[in-house]
Each structure stands twice: as C-alpha cells, then as structure tokens.
Amino acid sequence: MTSRQVSSEQKHFNTLMVCLLALFLSGIGAAALILHSVQQEELEARRMAQFYGRHFSQKIALLFQTLSQNLHPIYTMLVLQKGNTHNFEHIADYITASNPEIININIARNGVVTHVFPHEENKKALGHDLLRAEDRRQEANLAKQTKKLTLSGPFKLLQGGTGLAFRQPIYLPSPPEEREKIFWGFAIITYRFPEVISERIEFDMLSAAGFSWELWRTDPVSGKRAVLLSADTPLDKSAQRHEIPLQNVSWHLDICPENGWVNKKKLFLYISIGFSLCVLFSVAATQFATLINKNQEITIQAQTDSLTGLYNKTSFLELLEPALKRHLKNDCQNEEERLFLCVFDLNNFKQINDTYGHITGDKVLAEFAGRLSREISPRDFASRFGGDEFVAVFYCVPREEWLLPEKLEQIKLRLEGNYDINGKQLEISVSLGAISPKSDMLREKKEHLTLGEFFLEKVDMAMYSEKQTFHMLENLCTSENSKEKQI
C-alpha cells in the first residue's frame, strides 16, 4: 500500500467523520435554533408586556395625581379659614363644572359628612360616619393616622352608583398655643367609577396589541383580590405584575399575551424550519467545512514564509505601514512603550551553507525563526524578509537614546548561541539593527518611499554597521590566531 493510497483512505475516513459529525451537529443545531427562537419569542413578548404594563401604570398614576389635585382648593379653604366652611359651595361648583366625572365634593367634620355638593342628588350622604362605616372605615382611618391624602374605593354609594373617593385629612392647630395640630375632619371628592378611568385610559390598546389584563386592588375589608377592570380574555397565572403606587394605597396591573408567552403556531413553524435546516446542514456542512479549511490554508500560505512560518515580506509591510502611522501620530509621547523596528541578520550564514549544505542552512533558519516566534507578544510581529535576514516590530521601554532597550538585548542573546542541527553543534551569532521611528526623521524621506520602506532603509544601515563591527572583530581574531601559529 503506497503512501498516496493511505492518504486517500485517510481523506475518505475524515470525510465520513465530518459527515457523521455534521448529522450530529445538525440535530443539535436544529434543537438549539428552536430553543433560541422560543426563548426570543418569549423574551419579546415579555419585553412588550413590560413596556405596555409600565406605560399604563404610569398613565393611571398620573391620572390619579391629576384627579386628586381638584381637591386642593377645598383643603386650602378649610385650612386658611381654620375650619370655617364659608364659600364651600361656590368653590365646589367651580370645580365640578370643569370635571364631569365628579359625583360630589364633601366635607366630613370629625369624619361625619356635614356638607355635600351638589346637595339634592347627594343629600343621602349627609350624616354618614366614615370612621364607623364598615366599607369606609379602614381607608378613612388610614388617612387619619398617616395624615396623608388617601384614595378610597371603588365602593357602592348611598345615593346609588359606584365611586372612587380622595380623602384629605385636615389637621388644624389646637387653641390657644397653636402648636399641636388636632384632627378636624376630611375634605372629600368622589368620582364616577369606572368612567373616570375607562374614558381617559385607552385600555383597548392593550387588547388590540394581543394582551389580556386585569386592574385590581386588595380589598381593605376582606383582604382579598378585587378586580376593578379587566379584558374579555382570561388572564394566565404567569402574568407580569406591575404595582401602581397611588395616594397612600397601591393598585396592580397584571398583563400577559392572550395566546401565552409562546405562540403555539409559531412554535410549530420553528420546528418545521429546524427540521428542514437539519437536512440541509447535514448535506452542506461537509462541503462547507472543506471549503473553509482550504481557504484558510490558502490565506496562511499567501501570508507566510513556507520555510519559517513567519509573515512573508508582503504581509509584513502591510502590517508595518499602519503600525508606523499610529506610532508617529503619538509622536513618541508615550514614555512607557515605543515601537522599535528591528533587523536581524545571521553572521557568516553563507559559510554554513558552503560547509554543511543548504538543507542544514534551511534548518538553521527554521530554528532561528522558532526562537524568534517565542519572543513575539500579541502586539509584536516578525517576518523573514529574504535569505538570512529577518525583520520584526517590538514594543519596548527605551533606556537611553544611544542604547538598545533591555528587551531587545535579551532577545538577541536568546537568538544567538548553540544550534543543534542533525547532531551538529553550530555556534550562531546575529547582527541586530534597531530604531524607534521619530517624526523629525521624515525630513530625509523621499516622496516615492512608503513609511515602511524609508524606516527599513534606516534600520538596515544600523544593522550593517553592527555587522561590519562583527567582521572587523572576526578578522582581528583570525589574524591573531595566524600570528600565534607562526610563532
């Protein structure tokens, strides 16, 4: 069996595994899609319910705030006149004329109704003791004890119909000291219910949007849930609840979609779509994965040097240009880290090729690239620029203008030294040129050069200066060795 046959069988096996994996993943994907769709459906329904619930709760609270303010002139009159009811009917007539939902306005001295307007339609309310009436006393006493305006009802009225009442407790100074205030009675305004809400709050919008809803309160007598208004459709037990803080009491608005938080028709549609996608995915996934892998291989091959795995020259220059622009834009203001453009060149690499052959030379280059790769941080990048020349961008903290950063010195030391190539111990030395580009250098830049080409020329000059120093020292050592042999 040839290696080509083995490779072909391996490919068929991999294709089969991908196909099986695709079938498995398609099932998981379909289930995940359905689950996600259901969750999104429920999330959207809850979001809309939250929006409508909050909107209507705020509208009801604002409405009741407005309604309660109609009582303020009566309260002010009684306080300023120290309980004198003079001008009561005149003020009450003015208030009711502009508010058709008002049933009556009352004054209850010590909790007993003594004045009512309009009188004829509501005279049955006169003499009614709010602090003793079974269906009134809890909320009347709440207003008295808290000294706060309190909403009461809805409740059945003695004169017929159903109403909501705002009760404002009135406390007046006690003579003669006028320091401690004592309870005087109530100022009360009563509205028709449910007209006062239904004619001002458009609950039909909730039903039109597909929601069931209930507006309710806790009955102060029985302590049970008392539904005030509701939609025609039943309310689900999992409905959202929105508390409506009113005048010294709280009402509640419960809301949920008429068809539940998840629409069953849409759920069936999602299952059908998921099944179809499962079939399509199982057919297409293998081809798609193969195409992706090939594209990745092509992209990597186009960007990297085949021998070393580092960036090739073209890719390095594409990365270098924007990096230099960012560096120069900061104009070296960042004193902690600066961009350093570096060139590494292996000394006497031609001698290695001539002595041990090009295969050994290639392995030296690959080993050098491996060592260089281990020095690369996420911000740095490096390339084989050609032959035995490598370029890299490092971000380093500089020391003095004429000295390399310590980081680059340490990198150079780790790149040099003994290389074990096929059992041969080769001593490799490296020449390094490095500069940190500055804006004032651009005065020397020629127009036809890019930033990368210009600064690479600069760093090449720095590297060749070090390389010449290396060769001078090497020749000096060789000359001294020859003299010693002659002696």
Image (spheres, rainbow, N blue to C red):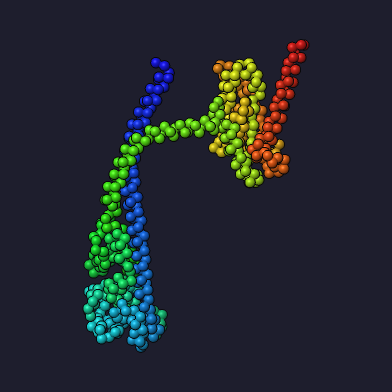
Q: In which quarter of the image is the C terminus?
A: top right
- Residue sitting at 29 percent across and 62 percent down? 207
Residue 239 to residue 479: above or below: below
Vertical comparison of 146 with 174: above or below: above
Left or right: 290, with 220 as reference point: right
Residue 171 pos. (x, y %): 36, 79
Q: Where is residue 93? Give x, y as percent.
A: 34, 85
Side of 413 relative to 183 (left or right): right
- Where is residue 255? Give x, y as percent: 30, 60
Residue at the spot 70% in from the left edge and 29% down from the top edge: 464
Picture quadrant where residue 218 is located: bottom left
Quarter holding residue 484: top right
**Front residue (pair 250, 210):** 210
**34 and 450: which is toward the camera:** 450
The correct choice, above or below, for 486 with respect to 200 in the image is above
Q: What residue is rendered at 63% in x and 16% in y?
A: 355
* Frontmost residue, 253 versus 274: 274
- Which image quadrant is residue 154 in? bottom left
Q: Where is residue 204 in the image (x, y as percent from the top left)?
A: 30, 65
Quadrant the N terminus occupies: top left
Left or right of residue 296: residue 73: left
Determine whether 349 is above or below 457 in the image: above
Is residue 80 in sight in this rendering?
A: yes
Q: Which residue lies furthest to the bottom in this view?
A: 86
